[in-house]
């Protein structure tokens, strides 16, 4: 059976089975993140769950695959498999604990004493090369070392969202074209294309990922529609799958037929991930932000100049007539904000939290002419801040309201129009004119 799935004749069947299982389980975090951004879901609770799951999935998957490569090459190095395993786990543990802490402390100094984003970019590339060199030395592929450096670097809240986008563009525009070009030179896709193997790999990959993600989301208490959305998101494989297959091909573990099947599977799953997510979520009953606004929870000019103060000011205004504790609600919103900043770009931020005991959504809105830093992807401060407090038992409401706000401010002139208003009535009128018309 392994031979039918594309195992090289000289490869160990057990190692091949471990590889194939890992290849079916891997996800493509960059593709998932981009899909969530396109659907205006990246900063929502659902988006945070998907991204966290994808990071954990990739961490476990690449750890297992790196050990597989170490097992293959162990006979050709001075390190035994057990030693390689121990060094790999030690490196991972140190990088994700001590290394992460040191990086977190170093970033403010780099941002303070270097010009622009160049210092952080150079620091990130140097660290990635160091991690790659070390893991290559101990018998594990270089990509695993760089991958762990990326996780440790990305865990710091000192790494601004704008810098993250710059790093992604740097890799996408310089390294990615070279990588994909090299693949085309190595493999003849026309002669190695096997319809039966492609369909088998695609079926196993999709069924396994969708079922696994659905069961996990169900255990997490998420509603049925969110379970399918998470499954469709996690099903995207992208470049991660292609890299995995290429390394296995170079190691003599798989045939070119299986590599081509993995590439096709990666492309198909990435292409359908976004449309299927949109389809699974469009069946929701639509909550419109304008239906939850009231004059008492609107402020034309916020007194706050920082993110924490803005949240405090909006929470105080939101719960003034509700049976809620200001400090408790503020702590919940700020805790969520620290997990993932809620600036969505285009001058808008949507801090939010799900509150125990709340029966209906509470929305407070504040404007700031000078702007408040909410770590948005475009690097721009927030001039319109929506605070969303929603029932803990109904996670769909927060997702729908956030999506509705994102749709309204997708209009290029939306922020300019809002900043020209003088009172609540004008604000409500502008939102209603900007709001997309519901589909018939």
Image (cartoon, rainbow, N blue to C red):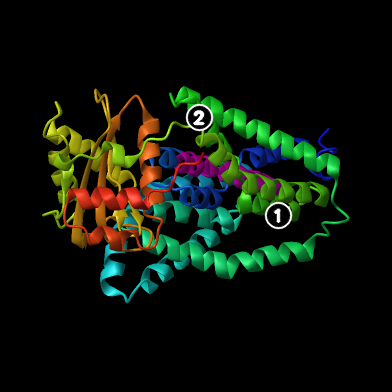
The reply to whether residue 110 is visible in this rendering is yes
* Residue ID at (24%, 22%): 357
Q: Residue furthest right?
A: 191
* Residue ID at (50%, 65%): 169
Range of residues picked out in magenta:
50-74
Upstream in the sequence, badge 2 or badge 1? 2
Where is residue 82? Give x, y as percent: 59, 41
* Residue ID at (47%, 32%): 284
C-alpha gap between disc 2 and disc 1: 35 Å
Where is residue 149? Give x, y as percent: 46, 56
Q: Quadrant of residue 278?
A: top right
Instruction: Assign a secondary structure to mark 1.
Output: helix
* Residue ID at (27%, 37%): 292
Main SS, magenta region, reads: helix
Q: Which mark is residue 430?
A: none
Instruction: Assign a secondary structure to mark 2.
Output: helix
Which mark is in front, 2 or 1?
2
Where is residue 429? Give x, y as percent: 27, 50
- Badge 2 is on which residue? 225
29 sits left or right of 106 in the view: right
Image: 207 above or below 63: above
- Badge 1 is on which residue? 246
Local crowd size for mark 2, using a 10 Å CA cut-off: few (<14), some (14–19), many (≥20): some
Image: 340 above or below 164: above
């Amino acid at each position: 059976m392994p031979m039918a799935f594309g195992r090289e004749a000289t490869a160990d069947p057990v190692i091949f089975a471990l590889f194939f299982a890992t290849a079916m389980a891997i996800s493509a975090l960059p593709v998932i993140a981009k899909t969530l951004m396109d659907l205006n879901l990246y900063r929502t609770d659902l988006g945070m769950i998907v991204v966290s799951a994808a990071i954990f999935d990739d961490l476990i998957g690449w750890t297992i695959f790196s050990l597989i490569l170490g097992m293959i090459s162990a006979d050709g190095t001075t390190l035994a498999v057990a030693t390689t395993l121990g060094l790999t786990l030690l490196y991972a543990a140190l990088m994700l604990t001590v290394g992460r802490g040191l990086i977190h402390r170093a970033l403010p100094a780099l941002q303070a004493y270097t010009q622009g984003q160049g210092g952080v970019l150079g620091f990130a590339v140097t660290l990635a090369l160091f991690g790659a060199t070390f893991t290559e030395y101990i018998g594990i592929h270089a990509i695993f070392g760089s991958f762990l450096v990326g996780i440790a670097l990305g865990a710091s809240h000192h790494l601004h969202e704008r810098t993250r986008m710059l790093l992604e563009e740097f890799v996408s525009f310089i390294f990615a074209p070279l990588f994909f070009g090299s693949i085309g030179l190595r493999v003849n896709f026309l002669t190695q294309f096997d319809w039966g193997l492609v369909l088998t790999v695609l079926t196993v990959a999709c069924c396994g990922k969708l079922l696994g993600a659905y069961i996990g989301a169900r255990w997490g208490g998420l509603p049925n529609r969110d379970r399918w959305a998470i499954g469709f998101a996690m099903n995207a494989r992208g470049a991660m799958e292609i890299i995995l297959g290429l390394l296995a091909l170079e190691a003599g573990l798989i045939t070119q037929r299986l590599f081509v099947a993995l590439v096709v599977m990666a492309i198909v799953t990435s292409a359908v991930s976004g449309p299927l997510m949109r389809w699974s979520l469009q069946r929701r009953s639509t909550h419109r932000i304008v239906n939850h606004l009231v004059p008492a929870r609107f402020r034309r000019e916020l007194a706050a100049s920082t993110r924490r103060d803005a949240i405090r000011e909006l929470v105080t205004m939101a719960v003034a007539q509700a049976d809620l504790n200001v400090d408790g609600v503020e702590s919940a919103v700020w805790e969520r904000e620290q997990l993932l900043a809620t600036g969505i770009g285009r001058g808008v931020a949507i801090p939010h939290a799900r509150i125990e005991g709340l029966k209906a959504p509470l929305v407070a809105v504040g404007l700031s002419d000078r702007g408040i830093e909410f770590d948005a992807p475009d690097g721009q401060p927030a001039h319109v801040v929506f605070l969303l407090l929603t029932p803990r038992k109904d996670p769909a409401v927060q997702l729908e309201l956030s999506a509705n706000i994102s749709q309204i401010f997708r209009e290029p002139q939306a922020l300019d129009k809002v900043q020209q208003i003088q009172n609540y009535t004008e604000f409500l009128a502008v939102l209603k004119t900007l709001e997309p018309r519901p589909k018939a």
